[in-house]
Image (tube, rainbow, N blue to C red):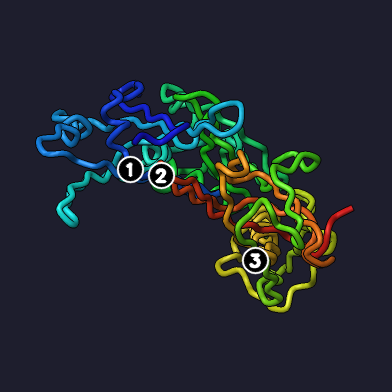
Amino acid sequence: MSIQGFSLLAGSPVPKPVPSDMMEALEAVEIVAAIGERGTFRLKFRLDRGSTLPARFLLGTGDLVRTVLVVGVGKQPAVAMDGVMVEHSVFTSDEERFLVIAGEDLTLLMDRIDATGRPYPGMAIATRIQLILAAYALYGVTPEVIPAPLTDLPAPTERIFHQRGTDYAYIRSLAAEVGYRFTLNPGPLPGASVAYWGPEPHADRSRPSLTIDFERPANVDRLELRFDMMHRVDPEATILDPASKAPIPVPVPNIDVLRLPLGAVVPPAQKRTRLHQAAKLSPLQAAAKLLAVASRSAESMTGSGVLNVRRNDLRLRAGELVDVRAASKPFDGLFAVRRVHDRITAQSHLQEFELVRAGIGAAP
């Protein structure tokens, strides 16, 4: 029995719809996606005696097999994953044989070559990101880069920025420095994806994907919300004046500079931390790092739940917004979907999801 509403495209270099016998053998699909992280997928196939499926997926050339997973929910199918197959395994269980294929999204292709030392003279962070991502246009990747609110751009005679690590590692490290996240969002069409580098959440706040009535949660199987008072920290940094070597404390910027929090009130920090090796930073560099720590640690309200996709004809995507109502005032309001984990079979499609936000209560 094939999985209704699910399509699989695979091939090298161009993914194409797989034959019907492959779809008939597909027993289970898992897809994991999260903001700021690499997406993964897992395909489980039933193997009949003499099946040629392993050889058809594991090419004799050893080339990476591009893989696109399309989930049909609602009126229009949506691309849930665009990646490559990484690991193939064959095993037996209770007289049954299975082929399991695990893969990762296309950021894996950005993480294969160490380009440490590549220079970027006179380039702001956003320009460096655009330049790096341009190399992946042949894979259908379109950059969406939001310039950082605080960025230091010294003259090339003073300093030239050099890359550290792979493209993926460098892009993520630059995001962490300014409080941003880097996520590769598949779609909207098969073979295309959007490389988003910017603040989270960035979805339309006036159009949440899901509204949950906490007293009558008919559209979710489970929902739990939590607030950790000790999660937020107050970072400190002291730099040295280049001329006098006098210590200069740098104030922490307001996290609203990045993006307005989803909650009405962001509670004060209960802990303090000091940035290490900050003495040689410029005031802007130190302020950006302080902002990054302050904004991430402010995300102290979280949640988790389970959504029955087929029953509700709705599937969440990482980065979308959920509106919670009647949970009590501190927990009401918008949450960002931080992570989703789809588990799909012919019988069911369940989606575990995680929520996050900075602030207590619903914002006006």
Contact (CB < 8 A) between labels 1 and 3? Answer: no
Q: Answer yes or no: do the residues labelled 1 and 2 have beta carbons within 8 Å?
A: yes
Considering only order in the chain, which callout, 2 or 3, is on the residue closer to the N terminus?
3
Q: Residue at left 18%, top 50%?
A: 96
Residue type, label 2:
Thr
Residue bearing mark 1: 27
Callout 2: SS: strand
Specify the quadrant that holds the N terminus. Answer: top left
Q: Which mark is residue 224?
A: 3
Name the residue at 35% across, 21% down.
16
Label 1 crowd bin: few (<14), some (14–19), many (20+), radius 10 Å: some
* Image height of 3 relative to 31, above or below: above
Q: Is residue 63 above or below residue 107?
A: above
Q: Is residue 218 left or right of residue 57?
A: right
Viewer can see residue 121: no
The residue positioned farthest toward the right in the image shown: 364
Instruction: Decide which of tag 1 and tag 3 comes sooner along the chain.
Output: 1
Residue 111 picture quarter: top left
